[in-house]
Amino acid sequence: MTEATAHAEKLEFKTELKQLLHIITHSLYSHREIFLRELISNASDAINKIKFDSLAHEDVLENNKDWKIEIIPDREKGTLTVSDNGIGLSREGAIDQLGTIAKSGTRAFLEQLRTQGIANRPDLIGQFGVGFYSAFMVADKVTVISRLAGDPKQGVRWESEGQGELTVETVEKPARGTDVILHLKDDAKEFLDEWRLRELVKRFSNFIEHPVVMEVEREAEGKKEVVEETLNAREAIWLRQKREVKPEEYSEFYKQLAGDSEEPARVLHYAIEGAQEYKVLLFVPSHRPFDMDWGETKVGPRLYVQRVLIMDHCEEMLPPYLRFVKGVVDSSDLPLNISRELLQRNPLLEKMRDEIVRSVLKDLAAMKEDEHDKYVPFFRALGDVLKEGIGRDWNNRERLADLLLFESMKTESGKYTTLAQYVEAMPEGQKHIFYLIGDTREQIEHSPYLEVFRSRGQDVLLLTDPIDEFMVSGLREYKGKQLKAVDRGDLEEDKKEGEKTKEEAERFKGLLDYLKSKLNEVSEVRLSKRLKESAACLVAPEWGMTAHMERLMQRMGRGELAAGAKRVLEVNPEHPAVVAMRELHEKKADDARLESYARLLYDQAVLAEGSMLKDPSAFARRINELLARDALGGAG
Ligand code: ADP
């Protein structure tokens, strides 16, 4: 050990961590006891890591395979220590991992605390990857003494009062692993109590697979003696028979695994036997997991091979669109002693994945059928994630399509139909599944695009998830019926309407040509088959971009992809305003008012498609001119 590395260094926490620590030390009072769960979970992770590393490098074990996590309350010193013989930390590791590296979850957690009201939900801390710092809820000083496995000389002592600074120095530490020593605050001495600790471990860490032990004094035959007691059940619950596991055991296991405080919506537990053997225990959450919205979601269940944890998230086992599914898969056949990279290319894994994905989708279908009341909130929270699968998982497209819920013109707001129900209810002669995409139901449900469908008694799906554009382009059809956007392309007409249109086209030709010559923004002007009440609307050409898609592109910063996309102006030949324009144009094609009317017609169509006017004040001026003229005309 050289002078340079041995010296004590004073360092500052990363800015966001300082903010986090300030809140933790000053404002979080409820659920303080969760600190123990977080520290035990870190200790257990550290043991899993060395267990895994030792498969390839047995020497890191230093002949110590007696995995355990010790809880050591010291009443005299007022300290509580959580000690493990896991992988340990190097000096650099301690500096990075415990204070100076930006953690993506910190901001998200701060935001959560701010919006939920501070002091409300510190129990969520573990889900944001900053669980260690919960120690400062109960301790006014935390000392970490650690040594990396396989490096017997270099131990590290990390210490902080949680005030923005930390110190590190190099120390001797004979035993591999980490001791986290909490100097308990005066009002946190309850965490020295044997019964309190026992209860907390049972409640929060019962299913941690490594023993959590504590030395306790027992009286046996009049003699006092100190014994080491294991506080947790350490159960691999997934290895048990389904019928032997109580619902509350599943839910407790889920909560510990997922760091969730709510019950899971579904539990999927089964064993595959035969050519391959593995056990599956998966959970579908009942709400949207927090980590889902800050881009850090890890995909896939924990993968064990014969009870050895191989990885926390086996991405090969579930596709990203099922990233909300949490749980465990334990295989008897996958090779234990190979690298992750090789394991990931193992053909057995692919077979397992196909089977597991199908089982999950089947289970979701069962929830939709049998527990609809549960399915609806699940779908509201996570349906957009599921929809990602439509374009990505060709083999399961139909299965996924059957899981989707849709609002439609005919459902009340907040009520749903399905593709199967939609197709079932299609009036005779309807060939397509119609849909309209927008930002909200309110914005689109009175849209001019729906008028003709309402009059024909046909339903239109109203889609409002940002992902829906991509979903429908991936789905394309369902049970042989093509999906068709009602704000795009030409509509086929009813037979009886055919004759009338031809004759109208003749009569309106002059006006249509005039409009086209004045409105450079549009690619074409034609008579509409979809308008009943409105005067005009804009539609995308058959293969062009709809207004909603264009807005989506702009929001994603890809506005250039949408630039220059022209739409078709459709006018309603039965609307009095359009009829009046036609007559005016016939009588006096150079009437100055005509151009202003053409602009108004176009601008209202822009508003109706939910877009912004390029020049709103010009629009207002034209409206006001009309108002003034009309009012004067009325008075005169
Ligand atoms: P998370 O565990 O979610 O990454 P934490 O804030 O709880 O977040 O821990 C930060 C990091 O500190 C861990 O990722 C790990 O690298 C390290 N660490 C914490 N506790 C231990 C421990 N007992 N042994 C080894 N490393 C640890």
Image (cartoon, grey):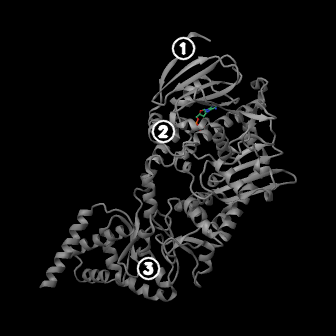
Q: Quadrant of residue 333?
A: top right
Q: Earlier in the sequence, mark 1 or mark 3?
A: 1
The label nearer to you, 1 versus 3, is: 1
Considering every residue shown, the one lying at the far top of the view is 3
Considering every residue shown, the one lying at the far right of the view is 274
Residue bearing mark 2? 24
Please rate how many residues cluster around mark 3, counting C-alpha atoms within 10 Å: few if below 14, some from 14 to 19, many from 20: some
Tell me how far mark 2 sits from mark 1, CA to CA. Answer: 30 Å
Q: Earlier in the sequence, mark 2 or mark 1?
A: 1
Residue bearing mark 3? 451
Please rate how many residues cluster around mark 1, counting C-alpha atoms within 10 Å: few if below 14, some from 14 to 19, many from 20: few
Residue found 51% across the figure and 33% down from its top: 186
Ligand 1 shows up in which quadrant of the image? top right
Residue 148 image offset from top left, x and y in percent: 67, 24
Q: Quadrant of the N terminus?
A: top right
Q: Is residue 315 above or below residue 357?
A: above
Q: Is residue 534 above or below residue 342?
A: below
Q: Quadrant of the C terminus?
A: bottom left
Image mark for residue 7: 1
Residue 424 image offset from top left, x and y in percent: 62, 79
